[in-house]
Amino acid sequence: MPERIKILDKKQIQQKIDRIAIQILEDNFEETEIVLAGIVPRGNTLAQRLKKVIESIGGLKVQLVNVELEKTSSSLNATTDISIDECKNKVIVVVDDVLNTGRTLVYGLGLFLNIPTKKVRTVVLVDRSHKLFPIHNDFVGLELSTVAQEHIDVVLGVEGQEDAVYLA
């Protein structure tokens, strides 16, 4: 097994979440409600944590949407736990743990193309800078240049393990 190097610990992850939450609030100061669309499995955990911070410091109502994608598909195959119509005319923030090629975020954004929105933003905890798709991340916790063979492992809320981000 390759050696894992911890690049973010629990405290640092929380600091990144707090900072991103403040940036989201600043970007949406005129809004009363936003939608955080978390991509399962770790993007939705990150979205839940962002929701908690945003609502505690900003008084902004946050609606969570869990997005499940078939990430290896060559076309958009996705499901959500609420109707996409409930997101109409709102600010949508698509949340994932790691931005690698950009495919997952592009698919996540694709869910909202057929409804009217106020604006759409993206959040990632770690951006690896290996984009194959023309995707822009609006809010990022850590930008980290890696080689293609390296892997980023994000541990969030896994029973028995402390939150951390590893480079392997």
Image (cartoon, rainbow, N blue to C red):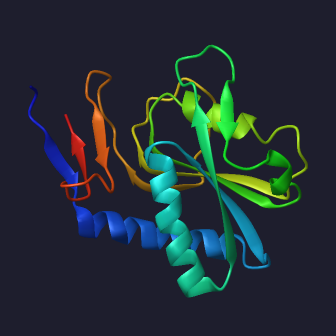
Q: Quadrant of residue 45?
A: bottom left
The tally of labels here is 0
Toward the viewer: 139 or 65? 65
Q: From what the image shows, is residue 44 above or below residue 100?
A: below
- Quadrant where the image shows the C terminus: top left
Toward the viewer: 63 or 127? 63
Residue 156 x, y percent position in the rendering: 33, 54
Residue 38 x, y percent position in the rendering: 57, 50
Taking the spot 89% from the left edge, 44% from the top edge, the residue there is 115
Taking the spot 79% from the left edge, 47% from the top edge, the residue there is 83
Q: From what the image shows, is residue 145 above or below residue 33?
A: above
- Quadrant where the image shows the N terminus: top left
Residue 109 x, y percent position in the rendering: 70, 39
Toward the viewer: 126 or 43? 43
Taking the spot 20% from the left edge, 59% from the top edge, the residue there is 162
Q: From what the image shows, is residue 39 above or below residue 157?
A: above
Direction from residue 149 to residue 112 in the image, left or right: right
Q: Quadrant of residue 128?
A: top left
Q: From what the image shows, is residue 52 above or below residue 73?
A: below
Direction from residue 133 to residue 89 in the image, left or right: right
The outermost residue toward the top is 74
Direction from residue 23 to residue 27 in the image, left or right: right
Taking the spot 43% from the left edge, 36% from the top edge, the residue there is 129
Toward the viewer: 100 or 145? 100
Direction from residue 107 to residue 115 in the image, left or right: right
